[in-house]
Amino acid sequence: MKLSLAASAAILALGFSAATAQDALAPATLDLWATNAGDIHSQAIQTSVDRFNAAHPGVTIKANIIPAPYPDKVAVAMSGGQPPQIYAGFGGGVLAEQVAAGKVYALDEALAKYPDWFDRFLPGVMTNATIDGKVYAVPMNGIQPVILYYNKQVFADAGVEPPKTWDDLLALVDVFKAKGITPIAVAGARADAWTELMWLEYLVDRVGGTAPLNNVIAGQENAWSDPAFLKAAQMIRQLVDAGAFGTTFSSASYANGQTDALMYTGRAAMQLQGTWDYDIVKGAAPDFIAAGNYGYVAFPSVPGGAGDPSALQGNPANFYSISTNTTPEQLAAALAYLHDEVSSDQYADDFIKIGYIPAIEGVGDKLSASSDPELAKFVYDLAAKASSFQLSWDQALKPSIAQAMVDNLNELFNGTVTPEQFVANMNNAR
Amino acid sequence: MLVPAALLFGGFALAPVLIAIPLSFTDWNGLSQLNWIGLDNWARVFQDPLALRSIQLTFLLTALSWLVQTPISLLIGVYLAGRQRHRAVIGAIFFLPLLLSSAAVAITWSNLLDPNFGAINQTLRSLGLVALSGTNWLGDPTLAFISVVVVVSWTYVPFHSLLYQAGVRQIPATIYEAAQIDGASGLRMFFDFTLPLLKYTIVTSSMLLIVGAVTSFDILFMLTGGGPGTSTRILPLHMYVQGFQAYQFGYSSALAVLLAVVGSALSYTLVRLSGFASMRSQTGA
């Protein structure tokens, strides 16, 4: 029989739509924001985005690697009403504020389409992306605890071993001071004062366990009067007064790579930093890393402290969230990117290859493919046996308290605020 | 004729300040709903030691900037106004800092002033001044403030020199010729003729300088971030930190309104004191 033009057109259209209904995404352009954790990390993000764009003609995700200070810029974009469609974050208190303001898409709503999506990830890490029982973000790089890096060459020349306890650390300070080497590099410039925070985080945890911070997060009255905070502040002053950080730390910066430079030029012996720093140093001084001179140990224990010495501080991961600033087409594309690409084995393998440990179940078996298998294994073992893994405090706390904390800590390090004043100021912070 | 200018001014200058006034009576984290809290933010402004300190630091920066920049700009402007050709060449070179963006200036200077790797300390070390070569230019509270004044002055002296150069060029040469015939020395000519005839240029330059210092943000933000601690956190910086880092836009708006009031009051006072409002022609007096 002869089909009419209209009928054949209708059949064609039906066939066409049946074929494309499966996986095709409507055309959309999206902005993706991620933090700048060094060129190697940025390249991995770009590769992933390019791969997704190539597989979905018509959809373009534009990756923007945002230089420090990243949280400020997200805050500005959100309050201006034009945040990017996909953006990286650290979870915790900042994410909670964004969720409370209705600015973040609840990924749970996509579970109908993607059941078992979140089962893939380590539960301990997902707690940071779960607010009031719903998931608002998925991990996008890897587990990043804070560890104590040391210059192996400098240590070998001085004939000493990396510290296992607080007393070891104090002894090392005297050894390196005598040799004219800054014992510990820390970035005390105000814009990088979060690097000083890592000292407070670990000392409070080692001395008082996880209860002191949890009481602060719970909003308990005068939570900062817990003796652990005062003791940690005093221990920091002890280090500063002993010359552990040198004399010019109050203007040293991290974002400009200066404290890293102190480490790889052998002018400083130790630096407390996150695992992201390894990649950054690799980009800045590849020979130093290739020679195996950037060593690392867990933060020392504090004898007599109530905290578990296996407790970790740092970033369980960076997470991608989808903002509510999306058209339906953008939302579909964003979900597809987060599920099909970011949560894929290929993506995880890419990040393992550049030295990260994705927060997925069973990742321990894959780490031999890492660019730095020794570091990856070390970090994985630390995380696997950690009694707790606390998110960096400047992200975990409510922003106004976090701000006051970093202000006061910077002043504590510089000696313009005493440990007692630090505690008093923090109790008064709102 | 005035409408486009008035619209621009109203839209970008007046409107934000007017919007900040009602915002200052709210508690807003920038993301969720506004909560009206009445005068709480304003009470806090006067009790918060950081806010009071930032106001003091703002005044200190303004005063120091004026004391450093005005004499230098004046002398350079007078020098550049001379008719010799080489002075024009020097003027062109000297103008360079003004062409740089404040971001470039701040980043370059913070690298120069870095205590470990910066060029200034490296030079001091190679000159044998080892004790000085460890100076913590941006990390010691007092030195950081002085460094800020130096960098800001370095950036803006060329601009004010330009104003003074133009002002001096407008003084008729006949006045100097007459004075020379009467036997006046160079110094006397400067103090008795040049300075008084530059009165309105000085007022203009000072007004721009003072309002600029009171509201300066970019160079300080990128050079010290308000640090070390809070020793260079002037009012505009405190306002930014409270808004975009502590997510307290209500309190930040109160600080913004305060800044607008202080800046306006200073300009108004300056205009009144100098008789700028009733400007009289100075030539041919």
Image (cartoon, rainbow, N blue to C red):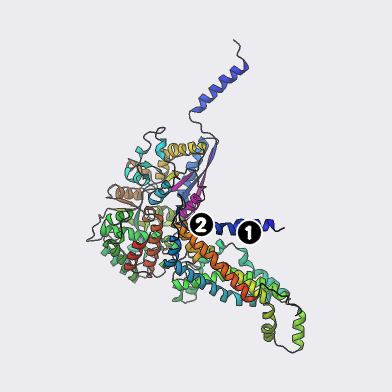
Against A275, residue B168 (above or below) is: below
The answer to whether residue B45 is left or right of residue B108 is: left
Is residue A182 in the magenta section? Answer: no
Dot 2 crowding, Cα within 10 Å, few <14, some 14–19, many 20+:
some
> Can you give x and y, in whole percent of width and height, for residue A176 in the image?
34, 68
Quadrant showing the C terminus of chain A: bottom left
Label 1: state its secondary structure: helix
Given the image, what chain letter belongs to the residue carrying mark 2?
A: B
Q: Determine the CA span between mark 2 and mark 1.
A: 20 Å
Q: Earlier in the sequence, mark 2 or mark 1?
A: 1
Q: Measured from the top left, where is residue A410 in percent x and y?
A: 39, 65
Q: Quadrant of the N terminus of chain A?
A: top right
Task: Check disc 2 and report the residue beneath it.
Answer: B22
Question: Is B193 in front, or is A358?
Answer: B193
In front of the other: label 2 or label 1? Answer: 2
Q: Which residues are magenta?
A: A59-88
Residue depicted at 35% across the width and 50% down the height: A375
The chain identifier of the residue carrying mark 1 reads B
Residue B19: x percent and y percent? 54, 56
- On the question of residue B135 being in view, the answer is no
Tell me the residue that label 1 is attached to: B9
Query: Is A62 part of what is drawn in magenta?
Result: yes
Q: Nearer the viewer, residue B198 or A198?
A: B198
